[in-house]
């Protein structure tokens, strides 16, 4: 239950990786990059239109690389009131980074996004959905309110731990089941990705997981990518899912930061506000 009396919180999150997604797979030829560009050019406008139609504010996790390549798209997202979160520099996994590199990348992302949209990110999502042994301590040190990369719960937030110590950073858990990429993202080479699910299959999974979040009075976090969910047939499914969710009473669509703030209020703790 949430402090505003709502029964279930719903966070639509979008990892706006654009071209940098393909850097993770170490490919940079034109077709790969064009898939990322498609996300910025086609996916983002479609998503902004849908979010505006239903008056929903969402969270976009943006690598600094995307902010440099597509500054107007990122500014437009922020101007519409959506939250902008940190998502690496060029979509690096922090898991294997030396602590100095992890620190440098955190600073690049914070500074690049703050300069572009005027607000310092309070949320972090690891591009690999993995953290290093230093990440929790660094996220706390840099004043992040939350991380959204781990899978230690499904419908409930929990404190991010640095070893055995609970940090003041909240963990907003994610799940591969609730990510569009494993369901839809297809690729041949260098990594074979199956993808290409029928939207009806994904709808079945996503709707049933929402039922679980609703029954447990918890939070429902979807992770999507403009270059993946932006395809027309998937957008049709996403809109049907939003309508299904909206047919339930007392559902609270909110940004990740808003949901984390409410959870921290209930816990009676949190990182001191930078506002
Ligand atoms: Zn990503």
Image: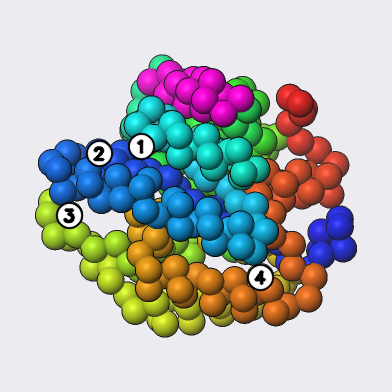
Is label 4 in contact with label 3 (beta carbons under 8 Å)? no
Q: Is residue 214 visible?
A: yes
Does the magenta portion include 45? no
Kindly identify which residue carries mark 1: 91
CB of residue at label 3: within 8 Å of ligand 1?
Answer: no
Task: Choose top left, top right, bottom left or bottom right for residue 261.
Answer: top right
Vertical placement of residue 164 versus 117, above or below? below
Left or right of 16? Residue 206 is right
Stretch of the chain drawn in magenta: 101-118
Residue 191, which numbered label?
Answer: 3
- How packed is label 4: few (under 14 Cα within 10 Å), some, or many (20 or more)? many
Q: Quadrant of residue 83?
A: top right
Q: Earlier in the sequence, mark 1 or mark 3?
A: 1
Mark 1 within 8 Å of ligand 1, using the beta carbon? yes
Badge 2 density bin: few <14, some 14–19, many ≥20, Cα 10 Å: some
Q: Distance from label 4 to label 3 (Cα)? A: 33 Å
Q: Earlier in the sequence, mark 4 or mark 1?
A: 1
Spatial distance from mark 2 to mark 4, Cα to Cα? Answer: 34 Å
Q: Residues within 10 Å of mark 3 (few under 14, many from 20)?
A: few
């Amino acid at each position: 239950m949430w402090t505003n009396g709502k029964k279930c919180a719903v966070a639509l999150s979008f990892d706006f990786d654009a071209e940098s997604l393909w850097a993770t797979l170490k490919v940079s030829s034109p077709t790969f990059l064009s898939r990322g560009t498609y996300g910025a050019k086609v996916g983002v406008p479609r998503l902004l239109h849908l979010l505006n139609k239903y008056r929903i504010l969402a969270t976009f996790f943006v690598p600094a690389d995307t902010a440099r390549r597509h500054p107007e798209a990122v500014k437009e997202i922020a101007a519409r009131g959506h939250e902008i979160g940190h998502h690496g520099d060029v979509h690096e996994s922090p898991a294997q980074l030396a602590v100095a590199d992890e620190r440098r990348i955190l600073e690049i992302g914070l500074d690049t996004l703050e300069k572009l949209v005027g607000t310092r990110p309070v949320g972090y999502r690891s591009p690999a959905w993995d953290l290093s042994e230093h990440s929790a301590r660094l996220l706390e040190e840099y004043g992040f309110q939350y991380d959204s990369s781990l899978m230690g719960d499904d419908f409930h937030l929990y404190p991010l731990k640095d070893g055995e110590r609970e940090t003041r950073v909240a963990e907003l858990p994610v799940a591969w089941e609730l990510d569009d990429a494993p369901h839809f993202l297809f690729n041949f080479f260098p990594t074979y990705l199956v993808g290409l699910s029928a939207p009806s299959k994904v709808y079945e999974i996503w709707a049933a997981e929402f039922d679980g979040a609703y029954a447990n009075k918890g939070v429902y976090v979807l992770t999507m990518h403009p270059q993946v969910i932006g395809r027309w047939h998937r957008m049709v499914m996403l809109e049907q899912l939003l309508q299904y969710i909206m047919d339930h009473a007392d559902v609270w669509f909110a940004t990740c930061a808003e949901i984390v703030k409410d959870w921290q209020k209930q816990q009676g703790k949190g990182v001191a506000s930078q506002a």
